[in-house]
Image: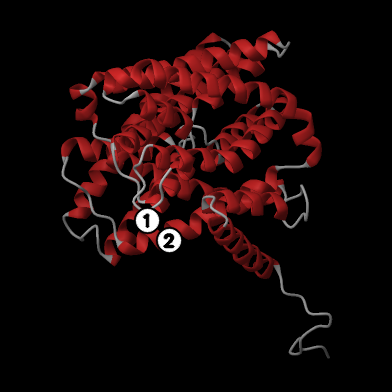
Amino acid sequence: MDLLIWPEWPLRFGALFHVAVALVLTALTGEAGRRLGVPRVTGYAVAGLVLGPLLLGWFDASDLASYRSVLDLTLALLLFELGIRLDLRWFAANPWVVATSLAEIALTFILSFGALWAIGTTGGLALAVAAIAVGTSPVIVMHVTSELRAAGQTTDRLLALCALNAACSVILFKLLVGGLHGVHGGWHLALLHPLYLLVGSILAGALIAGAYTALRKVVDPASEQGLVATVALLLAALAVLTALRLPAALAPLIAGALIKWYDPRPHLWPQQFGSVGGVLVIVTFMLAGSAATSGQVFAGVGVALVAIAARVLGKLGGTMAFGPASGLDLRKSLALGVALMPLSVLALLLAEDVRQLYPAFGDRLMPVVLAMTIVLSVLGPIATRWALVRARESRTGETS
């Protein structure tokens, strides 16, 4: 009788062992990157690519789907924090910041679409890539600014524009999905679905903000209990958003901005939040590489490089045109445009969402988005770090 009381040989460690080893390797790669003078998140991105199907094959696209809740939680926490840093009153006091954001968003979208259209990309695909190109990775931007302990005019605008870019990218992409609904399901679906997503996200954000405000009266947000309450609140919010089929990225950002609007005082975060957030960021980059196969990357790299070039021109054009009017000199305006370069997991999740709804369209979109995120998740953090150091807003003793 086999009681299964003795270990098998060869030993079977299970999936958790591979995840643990991958986490350690990703963290070590990030630290190695730091010692080489690049941001840790660049190392994380490289490790994710090495561990994924592009090289070692420890993770694949099924793991990206399996751990989707972890990715959504990471984005929700960071976007919620980013929203709380976003003081909407500042936009009223300095409307040129909004003008800068609108200019770089519009230029990025128009130039990306135009460049892809010019090389023969179909209209729907060009629009989808242009909508994704508008976004800037909140995960990378917040991690790099935290690593540098950056503070100043450029950093403030970078965080504000990053928040607006992420929101506009999601909204534009969902409008595009609404257009796909129109092709497949009629005009009423094309009109009602984006409206539902936008109004639903605003209402959900208001509810999250109200719940957080109520929790804050019971527990200190800067305490260990405050961390537990915040994470629990966002987990519950994600469950509700998923059940309602609302985008997980918009509501937490809106909630944070509403909290800051009603209470403009500085908001303290528990010290443990940095540790938890750091682990989640490492996991996020580790899993992001699981979507990249060599066939997909090679299939999309040509279109991706054209989109990246147009995106660079759009970001720099908008910040250079309106940055000086908002109070930045030309050097810092240039730095701001460069700092907006990162693109990461949010772009992948948007592409994956549309692939679940429309597989044929998603299969054409995903290779381009994958190639873009590979380039901009590795080089984007380096660009952001260079820009903040160049703007002399790093507090880690680094100089340009």
Percent across and percent down for residue 215 are: 22, 54
Provide the residue designation for mark 2. Answer: 276
Name the amino acid, label 1.
Val
Numbered-mark total: 2
The residue sitting at the front extreme is: 400
Q: Secondary structure at mark 1?
A: helix
Q: Residue at x 16, y 41 (%)?
A: 263
SS at badge 2: helix
Q: Is residue 331 above or below residue 212?
A: above
Query: In the rendered view, would you say 79 is above or below 4?
Result: above
> Does residue 243 appear anywhere in the picture?
no
**Label 2 crowd bin: few (<14), some (14–19), many (20+), radius 10 Å:** few
Q: Is mark 1 in CB contact (under 8 Å) with mark 2?
A: yes
Q: Residue at x 22, y 39 (%)?
A: 260
Residue labelled with disc 1: 231
Query: Taking 120 as reference, is 47 left or right?
Result: left
Question: Residue at left 67%, top 70%?
Answer: 17
Earlier-in-chain disc, 1 versus 2: 1
